[in-house]
Image: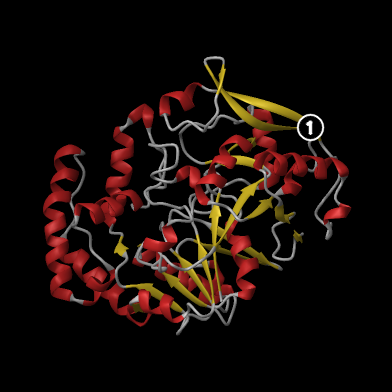
Amino acid sequence: MSVKVIVGLQWGDEGKGKIVDVYSSDVDLVVRYQGGTNAGHTVIIGNDKFIFHSIPSGILRKKLTCLISRGAVVDPEALLKEKDVLSEKGVVFKNRLFISKYAHVVFPYHKVLDELMDRKRKNNEIGTTKRGIGPCYADKYYRCGIRVEDLLKPKILRDKISFNLEIKNNMIKQVYKEKAFNAKDLCSQYEEYGKKLKQHISDCRDIVNRFLNKNILFEGAQGTLLGIDYGTYPFVTSSNPTAAGIFIAGSLPLNVDYESIGVFKAYTTRVGNGPFPSECEEKEAELLRNIGKEYGASTGRPRRCGWLDAFATRYSCRINGIDTLVLTKLDVLDSFEKIKLCVGYKYKDVLLEYFPASETILSEIEPVYEEYPGWNCSTKDVKDYDNLPQEAKNYIARIEEFFGKKIDMISIGSERSEVIKR
């Protein structure tokens, strides 16, 4: 028996989907424990490209059971479309995909409010995906949220939708001057979603407990620096993408030991607004973006690109108690003459000891860089660590020294097989 959790150590988009796919070859259950369709995990197998938003990417392993737990939020329309696309590629879901009946449901009014509220910020937009994730989580904590189990109970669903629309429609019409929603239409639409999802809806606590004597992998979405509590607030997501989330959001008993696997890129990216200390000049950023194909799997938006922020990533390692490190996209740096590594922050000429929580400080800090020579050759076909260019090994060694921890796996391409294990 083993329990592992895979978390992102940056602002998301670290390549977790591929790493989940690699690790899932040896597990029995994969659990997506937070977030919603604001995630985009990509797995490439041969000529086939699979993009996941809600469904755990472990579904590609034919013998695996996959679970969307109570800590996630579910957009039934998007989930059913995702399921259809994957089904067309031969993925089987019957008796393999389960959705917690206690997970909260995303409605169209959540998406509208997500966009309108962000637009209201004007020059200080968060830059959300506009998928309704934040407003859905907000309803959960307002205690007026609608859960997956409610989709199977027409009267309860109608009552809850009507109650929510009394509030939401007033806000949409009075504050934002937009068109209100029709309760009857929403009830009919979501009752149908319930019928289509019924075979997958379950009490996922029982499923997790049944698998405790087997191998379980928890799949995190987004990244630690986007976490609602430990991220660069307010430019964050609305859930906790840290390893600790597997206990409450993922229904894992507190007395179960686990291995925390942290994934980070050889450089850094960020989508949307918010502080980004190691962001490159546009010429270098564009080169990283084009080589690394840094466009959002969920929105298609170009990602902001910068050098590896080792100072922020080390902070994420500490928050998550990382046991195992995975470095991805090393090959993207193959053609760079010089490579920078951010190893600290200065604020008003003072070198900071810790990663700052303050939005004000983060917006004014100066990154401290070390510079390393590039290796100017391809790493994509390398199978053994010893065969990497010496300059690449020097770069990796410095990262390990800074983190105080060995990097256990290196991804040098998008294919499932393009990894170096140490």
Query: Can residue 361 be seen by looking at this rendering?
Result: yes
Quarter of the rendering containing residue 343:
top right
Quarter of the rendering containing residue 183:
bottom left
Residue shown at 20% from the left, 48% from the top? 179
Q: For this view, does 207 lie left or right of residue 408?
A: left
Dot 1 alpha-carbon crowd within 10 angstroms: few under 14, some 14 to 19, many 20 or more: some
Q: Residue furthest bottom?
A: 95
Residue shown at 42% from the left, 68% from the top? 252
Q: For this view, does 378 lie left or right of residue 241?
A: right
Residue shown at 83% from the left, 60% from the top? 383
Q: Position of residue 122 (x, y in %)?
A: 34, 29
Q: Position of residue 221 (x, y in %)?
A: 49, 56
Query: Can residue 303 be seen by looking at this rendering?
Result: no
Residue shown at 23% from the left, 63% from the top? 146
* Colour scheme in use: secondary structure
Q: For this view, does 166 lie left or right of residue 73?
A: left
Rendered position, 95 above or below 281: below
Q: Residue furthest top?
A: 349
Total marks shown come to 1
Q: Nearer the viewer, residue 220 or 184?
A: 220
Q: Position of residue 143 (x, y in %)?
A: 19, 56
Q: Which residue is mark 1?
A: 372
Could you tell me the amino acid type at mark 1?
A: Tyr
Secondary structure beneath dot 1 equals strand
